[in-house]
Image (cartoon, grey):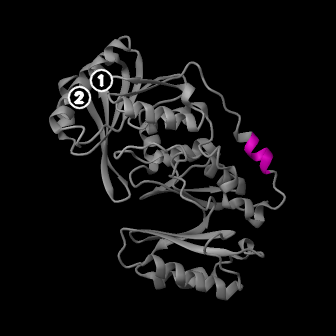
């Protein structure tokens, strides 16, 4: 019997609860949460692979060996040297990668070099910095140190459908979180009125259809080369997860006031075969009530534009005013609005004017860029 193994999902700081909920849904494991991570246990190696293939919130998925608080890099040398990594290094090449967040005492290149030297000296394993069989991953968030194997071997937040993007586009991982915080699920009527390149709506379509987010990346995963998967039925594994279908009862409305944005969204959705699940339309927010019956929309999630050459502050304020005015008409009484905002006080005033109450407001980070996620309910 395989003993319990620890796992780690790295996500955006502020969205740990979204990842924890997704891990529970996908592999049935409860999670503990820390800043930017969800920690879980499993007795199956394939659960790590399942999360790599299907998780829309994960930036990295690790088989976690250790985690503890550190003061400087030297604190990790002895624990790493004493831990048995032999199962991963059977005639395999390796590399060490680091991701250091909010810690100026730890240098990325030094951590990779020093930990890599410890592993090389102990196991005499070959280093391959270009295409390693196994990538050992160091993640440091402030003073918390995490060390394990990166099961995917690449950044899971990068989407292969984001070919036509706007300057305000957000990562798919963050867009997915907006969808989940809005309470969207299959069978609902969903709306993004400021869709830009369609990221939020495409993530909603993946979620509703249960199409694996990495459906087109099957051959990229590092875990194909892990010793633990020798003789594993990968065809059967992927076939099990590929049992998805479009749900005709789900409506995902991808609207924007600029035709170039609508075209970009439609092209991006077509890349991953989800364009038929979405309804695309060039529409000013003031006309939304002509597209929907009263109380017919279940939820709204959006990443609205920010001031630019295309949108002055005055024009954006007018759009937000019209947005809340029409949303009051089209949204169901129990419906939610989730907005990714910056400099949001004006949004709060407009929402209150049109019968919306702020139920949650919390910070989230995409890299070093800070946003606020605002969740509104009808008053």
Q: Is residue 36 left or right of residue 219?
A: left
When the figure is inspected, residue 246 is found, relative to residue 42, above or below; the finding is: above
Q: Residue at x 38, y 51 (%)?
A: 14
Cα distance, mark 1 to mark 2? 8 Å
Q: Which x, y percent locates residue 205?
A: 53, 32
When the figure is inspected, residue 92 is found, relative to residue 182, above or below; the finding is: below
SS state under label 1: loop
Contact, mark 1 vs mark 2 (Cβ under 8 Å) = yes
Q: Is residue 207 shown in magenta? A: no
Q: Residue at x 25, y 38 (%)?
A: 310
State the mark number for residue 319.
Answer: 2
- The picture quadrant where one finds residue 156 is bottom right
Which residue in the rendered view is the most extreme toward the right?
Answer: 231
Residue 137 visible: yes
Circle 1 packing at 10 Å, graded few (<14), some (14-19), many (20+), is: some
Residue named by callout 1 = 284
Residue 4 visible: no
When the figure is inspected, residue 96 is found, relative to residue 32, above or below; the finding is: below
Return the residue nearer the eye: 379 or 164. 164
Which residue in the rendered view is the most extreme toward the left?
Answer: 314
SS state under label 2: helix
Q: Earlier in the sequence, mark 1 or mark 2?
A: 1
Return the residue nearer the eye: 329 or 266. 266
Q: Residue at x 51, y 52 (%)?
A: 158
Q: Is residue 66 left or right of residue 230?
A: left
Q: Residue at x 38, y 58 (%)?
A: 367
Q: Which x, y percent locates residue 332?
A: 37, 18
- Which quadrant is the C terminus positioned in? top left
Q: Which x, y percent locates residue 361?
A: 29, 42
The magenta segment: 234-239
When the figure is inspected, residue 206 is found, relative to residue 2, above or below; the finding is: above
């Amino acid at each position: 019997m395989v003993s319990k193994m620890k796992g780690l999902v790295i996500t955006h700081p502020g969205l740990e609860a979204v990842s924890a909920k997704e891990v529970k849904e996908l592999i049935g494991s409860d999670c503990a949460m820390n800043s930017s991570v969800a920690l879980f246990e499993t007795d199956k190696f394939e659960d790590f692979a399942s999360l790599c293939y299907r998780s829309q919130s994960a930036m990295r998925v690790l088989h976690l060996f250790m985690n503890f608080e550190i003061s400087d890099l030297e604190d990790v040398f002895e624990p790493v040297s004493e831990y048995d990594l032999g199962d991963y290094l059977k005639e395999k090449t390796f590399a060490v990668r680091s991701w250091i967040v909010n810690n100026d005492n730890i240098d990325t290149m030094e951590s990779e070099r020093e930990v890599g030297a410890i592993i090389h000296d102990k196991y005499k394993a070959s280093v391959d910095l270009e295409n390693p069989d196994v990538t050992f991953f160091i993640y440091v968030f402030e003073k918390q140190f995490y060390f394990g194997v990166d099961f995917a071997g690449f950044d899971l937040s990068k989407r292969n459908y984001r070919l036509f993007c706007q300057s305000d586009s957000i990562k798919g991982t963050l867009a997915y979180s907006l969808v989940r915080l809005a309470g969207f699920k299959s069978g609902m009527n969903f709306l993004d009125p400021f869709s830009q390149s369609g990221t939020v709506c495409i993530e909603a379509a993946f979620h509703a259809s249960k199409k694996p987010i990495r459906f087109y990346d099957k051959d990229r995963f590092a875990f194909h080369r892990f010793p633990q998967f020798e003789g594993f039925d990968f065809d059967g594994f992927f076939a099990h997860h590929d049992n998805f279908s479009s749900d005709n009862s789900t409506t995902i409305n991808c609207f924007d006031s600029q035709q170039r944005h609508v075209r970009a969204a439609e092209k991006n959705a077509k890349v991953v075969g989800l364009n038929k699940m979405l309804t695309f339309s060039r529409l000013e927010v003031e006309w939304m009530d002509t597209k929907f019956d009263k109380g017919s929309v279940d939820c709204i999630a959006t990443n609205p534009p920010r001031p630019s050459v295309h949108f002055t502050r005055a024009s954006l304020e007018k759009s937000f005013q019209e947005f809340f005015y029409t949303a009051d008409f089209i949204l169901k009484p129990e419906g939610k609005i989730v907005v990714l905002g910056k400099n949001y006080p004006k949004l709060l005033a407009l929402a209150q004017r049109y019968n919306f109450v702020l139920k949650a407001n919390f910070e989230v980070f995409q890299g070093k860029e800070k946003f606020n996620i605002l969740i509104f309910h009808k008053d």
